[in-house]
Amino acid sequence: MGIEAFCMQILNMNKNCIKMVMKEMIVLNERIKKKHAVDPGTAASLIRLEQVGKSYGSRKVLSEISLSLDRGESLILRGGNGSGKSTLLKLVAGIIPASSGHIHRSSMQLQMGYAPDRLPKLRMTSEEYLIHMGQIGGMPMATLTTRIEELHELLELPAHSPSLLIHYSKGMLQKVNLMQACLLRPALLLLDEPFSGLDTDSSEKLLTLLHGLRAKGTAVVTALHDPLPSWESVSTTYRIREGQLILEETDTNEALNAGSIRYELDGLLTEEARAGLAAAFPHVDWTAAGNAVRCEIPSEDCHAFMHDFWQADGIVLSLKRKEGAI
């Protein structure tokens, strides 16, 4: 049985065979670890792709993809429907094998989280589903319970709701999908259209989660369709075109007018941390009332500022792109 098909079996399994399937999944995970080469000379990179290609029969989906991903790095994948974004995510996750090339991982124990573009409607509550997924990942029950409550609170879903996933809306299912990907605080997080189905407030909550994980060293790869300036500001964007991975350069007009592009951040930060950031980023404008802050961040400073803001345990309430004369 293929790995992808097996994962679908897990999502539709009967509760009375959970333990048996969990044991089989552990064996399958060990096979995946042994299958991929480990490159001891690339300790700085979590994962490195060398001339990777993927074909289905005579149809070539991806060709000669070379890419490396370091801790705390964020990549965005863009492309039309069927361009190969989802296929590339599955290759990186180890769900499907490459047809050519090599994938090197920094460690056999590299912890990854993967959220597909949709989660099937299951006859389980969100808590039951996440407990099973956490147990498959080997999480201690006490740690797992705490983490499930944290994620429910952050994404604003009731943690102990008796409602089954078959009754959830698209947005609610997407939240559960994202929770399972983030359960283990992965070193590498792979998200396929993570903002699909989420309203504005939920999208802001997800951004808060992603910025926090990234600041703590998690590398994040997201396949996105719609523009998302606040995430693009801290990410490198690639476009898949005719099976090739192409780096998107900054738009010429945007580069010429970079001085007029700023980001407005509303958040919470201690006065001590604010003083340190203000000294490190003299071109950032601050408005503060107690721990509540509003920052006007120049485009060229946004990437570094957001990293340091999260390292200082700041909380982002919103981050918006602004254009026009200063």
Image (cartoon, rainbow, N blue to C red):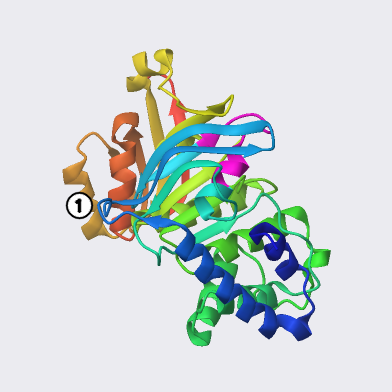
Between 204 and 130, the residue placed more toward the observer is 130
Q: Nearer the viewer, residue 297 or 171?
A: 171
**Is 251 left, or right, of 25 in this rendering?**
left
In the rendered image, residue 80 lying in the magenta stretch gets the answer yes
**Which quarter shows the N terminus?**
bottom right
Residue that mark 1 sits on = 275
> If the image is split into quadrants, where does the C terminus sit?
top left
Dot 1: element? helix
Sort mark 1 into few (<14), some (14-19) or many (20+) by Cα contacts within 10 Å. few
Q: Position of residue 170 (x, y in %)?
A: 75, 54
- Amino acid type, residue under disc 1 in the picture: Ala
Which residue is found at the position 57% from the left and 79% from the top? 135
Relative depth, front residue between 271 and 254: 254
- Residue 148 in magenta stretch: no
Residue 204 placement (x, y as % from top left): 54, 49
Left-right relation of 75 to 70: right
- Residue at image position (58%, 49%) is 90
Tell me if I can see residue 320 in this picture: no
Residue range of the region highlighted in magenta in the rendering: 77-89
Q: Quadrant of residue 126?
A: bottom right
Q: Position of residue 288 (x, y in %)?
A: 33, 49
What is the residue that sits farthest to the left in this orientation?
279
